[in-house]
Amino acid sequence: MGVRIPIRIKSIDAILREEHGSLRQLTVDERRVLLRFARAMELSIENAWPVDTGTSRDGWRSRMFGTTSNEIGGIGILLDNPVFYVQHIRRSGEKAVGLGPLWRRLVPEVVARFRDPLLRAMRVEIRKTEARLSGGASFLDILQRRFSPGVMSG
């Protein structure tokens, strides 16, 4: 039994409400920003994971959720590791009782470290989208990346 850790990022919904006026699905470029941070979190966990458990270290994966039209609202990142013994990994010298599994301490630390930079980057990209919309581009064109280079500037 591995672990699945959904990390809902309510602040992205709040940014969308503030900048767009309501929730909407994320554009390709906005999803790219979120995915870049999801991958950075995944790599940060891998880098902090004990090397002698290479299979479980390499088992970490990330993906986004709540980013498409059928999932509006509840945007977040899912971190998971399907390796059956991941629940039992601890750092060398740690006792089996007391601190609990390493992932329960490590994941919150990593999320806290990336939270503010992620939110800043998402706000910048959402504002770019909103500027394109106010410049006359349709949301469908932005979603399908059919807009003129002049609309892209900024």
Image (cartoon, rainbow, N blue to C red):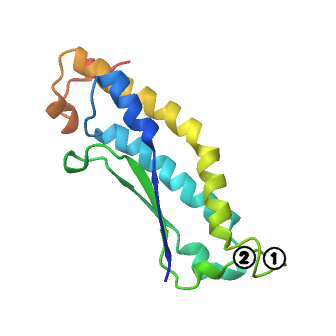
Circles 2 and 1, Cβ within 8 Å, touching? The answer is yes
In the picture as drawn, the residue positioned furthest to the top comes out as: 135
Quick check: 50 left or right of 34? right
Query: Which SS class for mark 1?
Result: loop
Can you say whether 34 is above or below 14 in the image? below
Disc on res. 90: 2
| Residue 5, image x, y percentages | 49, 63
Crowding at dot 1, Cα within 10 Å, few <14 / some 14-19 / many 20+, comes out as few
Q: Amino acid at mark 2?
A: Arg
Quadrant in the rendering for residue 140:
top left
- Between 110 and 42, the one nearer to me in the picture: 110
Residue type indicated by callout 1: Glu
State the separation of the CA atoms marked 2 and 1.
6 Å
Outermost residue to the right: 93
Q: Nearer the viewer, residue 79 or 129?
A: 79
Q: How many marks?
A: 2
Which residue: 20% across, 23% down?
148
Place of residue 2 in the rendered image (x, y in percent of width and height, measured from the top left)? 50, 78
Q: Which mark is residue 94?
A: 1
Q: Residues within 10 Å of mark 2 (few under 14, many from 20)?
A: some
- Name the spot of residue 121 as percent of width and height, x first: 49, 33
Residue depicted at x 71% and y 74%: 50
* Relative height, residue 46 to residue 112 (above, below): below
